[in-house]
Image (cartoon, grey):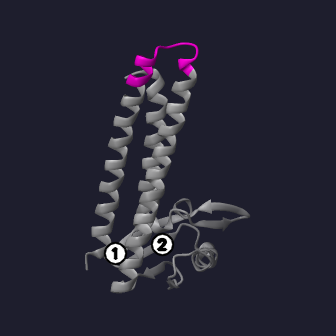
Amino acid sequence: MDERIKQYEEKMKKAYDFLGTDLAAIRAGRANPHVLDKLRVDYYGTPTPLQQVGNVSVPEPRMLQIAPWDKSLIKDIEKAILASDIGITPSNDGTVIRLVFPELTEERRKDLVKEVKKKGEDGKVAVRNIRRDGNEAFKKLAKTEISEDEIKDLEDELQKLTDKYIKDIDKLVEEKSQDIMKV
Protein backbone atom coordinates (compact mmCIF):
# COMPACT_ATOMS: atom_id res chain seq x y z
CA MET A 1 0.00 0.00 0.00
CA ASP A 2 1.18 3.49 -0.86
CA GLU A 3 2.61 5.49 2.07
CA ARG A 4 0.41 8.44 1.11
CA ILE A 5 -2.69 6.24 1.54
CA LYS A 6 -1.53 4.66 4.82
CA GLN A 7 -1.95 7.84 6.88
CA TYR A 8 -5.57 8.15 5.75
CA GLU A 9 -6.24 4.48 6.49
CA GLU A 10 -4.92 5.00 10.04
CA LYS A 11 -7.30 7.94 10.51
CA MET A 12 -10.24 5.89 9.20
CA LYS A 13 -9.29 3.02 11.52
CA LYS A 14 -9.25 5.45 14.46
CA ALA A 15 -12.71 6.76 13.51
CA TYR A 16 -13.99 3.15 13.29
CA ASP A 17 -12.40 2.18 16.63
CA PHE A 18 -13.85 5.30 18.30
CA LEU A 19 -17.32 4.35 17.05
CA GLY A 20 -16.85 0.80 18.37
CA THR A 21 -15.91 2.13 21.81
CA ASP A 22 -18.80 4.58 21.74
CA LEU A 23 -21.32 1.87 20.84
CA ALA A 24 -19.97 -0.48 23.53
CA ALA A 25 -21.02 2.07 26.15
CA ILE A 26 -24.68 1.91 25.04
CA ARG A 27 -26.47 -0.66 27.14
CA ALA A 28 -28.54 -3.30 25.44
CA GLY A 29 -30.72 -4.70 28.22
CA ARG A 30 -27.90 -6.76 29.71
CA ALA A 31 -25.42 -5.41 32.21
CA ASN A 32 -22.29 -4.34 30.37
CA PRO A 33 -19.25 -3.16 32.38
CA HIS A 34 -18.36 -0.80 29.48
CA VAL A 35 -21.18 1.57 30.50
CA LEU A 36 -18.86 2.56 33.37
CA ASP A 37 -15.80 3.23 31.16
CA LYS A 38 -16.21 7.02 31.16
CA LEU A 39 -16.94 7.19 34.89
CA ARG A 40 -14.40 9.06 37.03
CA VAL A 41 -14.29 8.77 40.82
CA ASP A 42 -12.81 11.43 43.07
CA TYR A 43 -9.90 9.45 44.55
CA TYR A 44 -8.09 11.67 47.06
CA GLY A 45 -8.72 14.75 44.92
CA THR A 46 -7.87 13.10 41.59
CA PRO A 47 -10.53 12.06 39.03
CA THR A 48 -9.68 8.37 38.55
CA PRO A 49 -11.29 5.78 36.21
CA LEU A 50 -13.63 3.48 38.14
CA GLN A 51 -11.75 0.38 36.95
CA GLN A 52 -8.65 1.64 38.81
CA VAL A 53 -10.35 1.95 42.22
CA GLY A 54 -12.34 -1.29 42.28
CA ASN A 55 -13.31 -4.52 40.63
CA VAL A 56 -16.32 -4.46 38.27
CA SER A 57 -18.07 -7.80 37.75
CA VAL A 58 -21.31 -9.13 36.23
CA PRO A 59 -22.77 -11.62 38.74
CA GLU A 60 -26.14 -11.76 36.92
CA PRO A 61 -27.17 -10.83 33.34
CA ARG A 62 -28.82 -7.56 34.47
CA MET A 63 -26.56 -6.61 37.39
CA LEU A 64 -23.14 -5.00 37.75
CA GLN A 65 -21.25 -5.30 40.99
CA ILE A 66 -18.47 -2.89 41.97
CA ALA A 67 -16.15 -3.95 44.78
CA PRO A 68 -13.90 -0.99 45.68
CA TRP A 69 -10.44 -1.89 46.96
CA ASP A 70 -10.72 0.94 49.48
CA LYS A 71 -14.09 0.67 51.28
CA SER A 72 -14.02 4.39 52.13
CA LEU A 73 -14.63 5.07 48.41
CA ILE A 74 -18.17 3.61 48.37
CA LYS A 75 -19.82 7.04 48.86
CA ASP A 76 -17.59 8.66 46.19
CA ILE A 77 -18.36 5.89 43.69
CA GLU A 78 -22.11 6.22 44.36
CA LYS A 79 -21.84 9.98 43.90
CA ALA A 80 -20.04 9.50 40.54
CA ILE A 81 -22.70 7.03 39.35
CA LEU A 82 -25.56 9.32 40.35
CA ALA A 83 -23.89 12.30 38.61
CA SER A 84 -23.37 10.30 35.39
CA ASP A 85 -25.87 9.72 32.57
CA ILE A 86 -26.25 5.98 33.31
CA GLY A 87 -29.67 6.54 34.86
CA ILE A 88 -29.43 3.78 37.48
CA THR A 89 -29.53 4.29 41.23
CA PRO A 90 -26.77 2.32 42.97
CA SER A 91 -27.35 0.30 46.14
CA ASN A 92 -24.67 -0.84 48.56
CA ASP A 93 -24.31 -3.17 51.52
CA GLY A 94 -21.23 -1.49 52.96
CA THR A 95 -18.74 -3.56 50.97
CA VAL A 96 -20.00 -3.67 47.36
CA ILE A 97 -22.16 -1.49 45.13
CA ARG A 98 -24.80 -3.10 42.94
CA LEU A 99 -26.33 -1.62 39.81
CA VAL A 100 -29.50 -3.42 38.70
CA PHE A 101 -30.40 -2.72 35.08
CA PRO A 102 -34.15 -2.62 34.45
CA GLU A 103 -35.62 -4.39 31.45
CA LEU A 104 -35.72 -1.98 28.49
CA THR A 105 -39.13 -1.01 27.12
CA GLU A 106 -39.85 -1.39 23.42
CA GLU A 107 -39.90 2.40 23.05
CA ARG A 108 -36.55 2.79 24.83
CA ARG A 109 -35.03 0.08 22.60
CA LYS A 110 -36.19 1.98 19.50
CA ASP A 111 -34.70 5.22 20.87
CA LEU A 112 -31.40 3.43 21.50
CA VAL A 113 -31.39 2.04 17.95
CA LYS A 114 -31.93 5.59 16.63
CA GLU A 115 -29.01 6.77 18.76
CA VAL A 116 -26.82 3.92 17.45
CA LYS A 117 -27.73 4.78 13.85
CA LYS A 118 -26.95 8.46 14.45
CA LYS A 119 -23.55 7.55 15.88
CA GLY A 120 -23.00 5.29 12.86
CA GLU A 121 -23.83 8.18 10.52
CA ASP A 122 -21.39 10.41 12.42
CA GLY A 123 -18.73 7.73 11.97
CA LYS A 124 -19.42 7.54 8.23
CA VAL A 125 -19.22 11.34 7.96
CA ALA A 126 -15.84 11.23 9.70
CA VAL A 127 -14.58 8.60 7.23
CA ARG A 128 -15.85 10.62 4.26
CA ASN A 129 -14.17 13.77 5.63
CA ILE A 130 -10.89 11.86 5.82
CA ARG A 131 -11.38 10.80 2.18
CA ARG A 132 -12.06 14.43 1.19
CA ASP A 133 -8.90 15.59 3.01
CA GLY A 134 -6.92 12.90 1.22
CA ASN A 135 -8.28 13.84 -2.19
CA GLU A 136 -7.47 17.51 -1.57
CA ALA A 137 -3.93 16.61 -0.52
CA PHE A 138 -3.49 14.53 -3.69
CA LYS A 139 -4.70 17.42 -5.87
CA LYS A 140 -2.06 19.67 -4.27
CA LEU A 141 0.58 17.06 -5.13
CA ALA A 142 -0.60 17.17 -8.75
CA LYS A 143 0.72 20.67 -9.16
CA THR A 144 4.24 19.64 -8.23
CA GLU A 145 5.14 16.00 -7.76
CA ILE A 146 3.00 13.40 -9.52
CA SER A 147 1.04 12.81 -12.71
CA GLU A 148 -2.75 12.95 -13.04
CA ASP A 149 -2.84 9.18 -13.62
CA GLU A 150 -1.08 8.57 -10.30
CA ILE A 151 -3.54 10.91 -8.60
CA LYS A 152 -6.46 9.01 -10.13
CA ASP A 153 -4.95 5.74 -8.80
CA LEU A 154 -4.51 7.23 -5.31
CA GLU A 155 -8.07 8.57 -5.31
CA ASP A 156 -9.40 5.16 -6.43
CA GLU A 157 -7.45 3.41 -3.67
CA LEU A 158 -8.71 5.91 -1.11
CA GLN A 159 -12.28 5.39 -2.35
CA LYS A 160 -11.93 1.60 -1.92
CA LEU A 161 -10.71 2.16 1.64
CA THR A 162 -13.62 4.51 2.32
CA ASP A 163 -16.10 1.94 0.97
CA LYS A 164 -14.54 -0.77 3.16
CA TYR A 165 -14.79 1.31 6.35
CA ILE A 166 -18.33 2.47 5.58
CA LYS A 167 -19.35 -1.17 5.06
CA ASP A 168 -17.66 -2.09 8.38
CA ILE A 169 -19.47 0.77 10.16
CA ASP A 170 -22.81 -0.38 8.70
CA LYS A 171 -22.10 -3.92 9.94
CA LEU A 172 -21.18 -2.65 13.43
CA VAL A 173 -24.34 -0.51 13.63
CA GLU A 174 -26.51 -3.41 12.41
CA GLU A 175 -25.04 -5.82 15.00
CA LYS A 176 -25.53 -3.33 17.83
CA SER A 177 -29.10 -2.54 16.69
CA GLN A 178 -30.00 -6.25 16.63
CA ASP A 179 -28.38 -6.68 20.05
CA ILE A 180 -30.52 -3.84 21.47
CA MET A 181 -33.78 -5.11 19.92
CA LYS A 182 -33.21 -8.68 21.19
CA VAL A 183 -35.46 -9.22 24.20
Q: Main secondary structure of the magenta part?
A: helix
Residue at the spot x=59%, y=80% of the render?
A: 82
Q: Under tag 2, what secondary structure?
A: strand
Which quadrant would the C terminus be assigned to in this image? Answer: bottom left
Amino acid carrying mark 2 in the image: Ile
Q: Under tag 1, what secondary structure?
A: loop
Residue 152 highlighted magenta (yes or no): yes
Question: At which x and y percent is residue 159?
Answer: 38, 36
Towards the viewer: 147 or 15: 147
Which quadrant would the N terminus be assigned to in this image? Answer: top left
Amino acid carrying mark 1 in the image: Arg
User: In the rendering, which numbered label is found on residue 43?
Assistant: none
Q: Is residue 96 visible?
A: yes
* Quadrant housing residue 151: top left
* Quadrant housing residue 158: top left
| Residue matched to label 2 | 66
Magenta stretch, residue numbers: 141-153
The 10 Å Cα crowd at callout 2, few under 14, some 14 to 19, many 20 or more, is: many
Residue at the spot x=48%, y=24% of the render?
A: 4
- Residue at the right extreme? 45
| Residue matched to label 1 | 30
Residue at the spot x=36%, y=44% of the render?
A: 165
The 10 Å Cα crowd at callout 1, few under 14, some 14 to 19, many 20 or more, is: many
Tell us which disc is closer to us: 2 or 1. 1
Residue 102 highlighted magenta (yes or no): no
Question: At which x and y percent is residue 125?
Answer: 48, 51
Towards the viewer: 139 or 76: 139
Residue at the spot x=50%, y=40% of the render?
A: 130
Q: Earlier in the sequence, mark 2 or mark 1?
A: 1
Q: Is residue 35 above or below residue 22?
A: below
